[in-house]
Amino acid sequence: MSEKKIRFPEISLQTRLMWDLFFLLVLAVIVYLVAGQFDILERIVAFAHQYEEWELDELLIVSFVMSGVLAVYFLRQWFAIFKSQREVAAKNSDLQKALAEIKRLKGILPICTQCKKIKDEKGHWNHLEAYIEKHSEADFSHSICPECARELYPDIFEDDE
């Protein structure tokens, strides 16, 4: 019996962050309702008055401030993630456009051994330069190599030998 692997759908970072924020909101509402039901703040204040030497009222203020600081920190991180996600999406789209513009020669090209013309997809024979210019980003500048120059113009290159 073959085992089937369960694949869970990929959740985007934005969706995951939205669920995290929703969970934190629900958790905050539950804490608010429980604290209101049992008068937790009043009990903390009464406990702080009873044990004044523990300085719980200062700890309570510090904990509220730290909660605010952490909330601001996480919000800034959340916005930074969204910004970087947009940048990555923009770069991916730029790369996709660049990839679409690239023309590449690949495969086996039939070429005439005598005149060096290349047979295209439609069966027409094209000059090598025209075919490569059409199917790539290359441009040609014609010149002549020293061997061909000696062969074509022997009287000019006699003294080089």
Image (tube, rainbow, N blue to C red):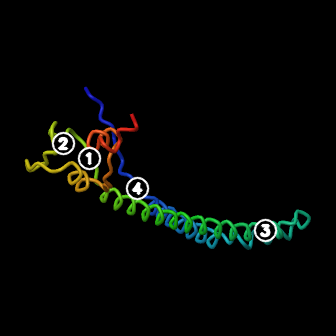
Q: Which residue is mark 2?
A: 116
Q: Amino acid at mark 1?
A: Leu
Determine which of the numbered discs, if any, sits on residue 62 in the image: 3
Residue at (11, 48) in percent of width and height: 125
Q: Nearer the viewer, mark 2 or mark 4?
A: 2
Q: Position of residue 154 (x, y in %)?
A: 29, 40
Q: Which numbered disc, 3 or 2, marks the residue that appears first in the sequence?
A: 3
| Residue located at (24% from left, 53% from top) | 135
Q: Secondary structure at mark 4?
A: loop
Looking at the image, is 30 positioned above or below residue 149?
Answer: below
Task: Give, as a three-letter code, the residue at label 3.
Answer: Val
Closest to the observer, 58 or 138: 138
> In the displayed structure, would residue 42 be above or below residue 154?
below
Q: Position of residue 138 (x, y in %)?
A: 32, 54
Labels 1 & 2 near each other (Cβ < 8 A): no
Front in this rendered view, residue 101 or 54: 101
**Type of the residue with mark 4:** Ile
Q: How far apart, in angstroms, are the residues tagged by discs 4 and 3?
A: 36 Å
Q: CA distance from mark 1 to mark 2?
A: 16 Å
Residue designated by label 1? 105
Q: In the rendered image, which quarter is residue 64 located in?
A: bottom right
Secondary structure, mark 2, is loop
Q: What residue is shown with label 4?
A: 11
The answer for how far apart the CA atoms under marks 1 and 3 are is 67 Å
Of 105 and 26, nearer the camera is 105
Q: How many other residues sit within 10 Å of disc 1, few (<14), some (14-19) or many (≥20)?
A: few
Task: Mark 4 vs mark 3: give the one in front.
Answer: 4
**Residue 130: horizontal and vertical position, in percent?**
21, 54
Q: Secondary structure at mark 3?
A: helix
Q: Quadrant of residue 137?
A: bottom left
Query: Residue 89 versus residue 41: which sits nearer the camera?
Result: 89
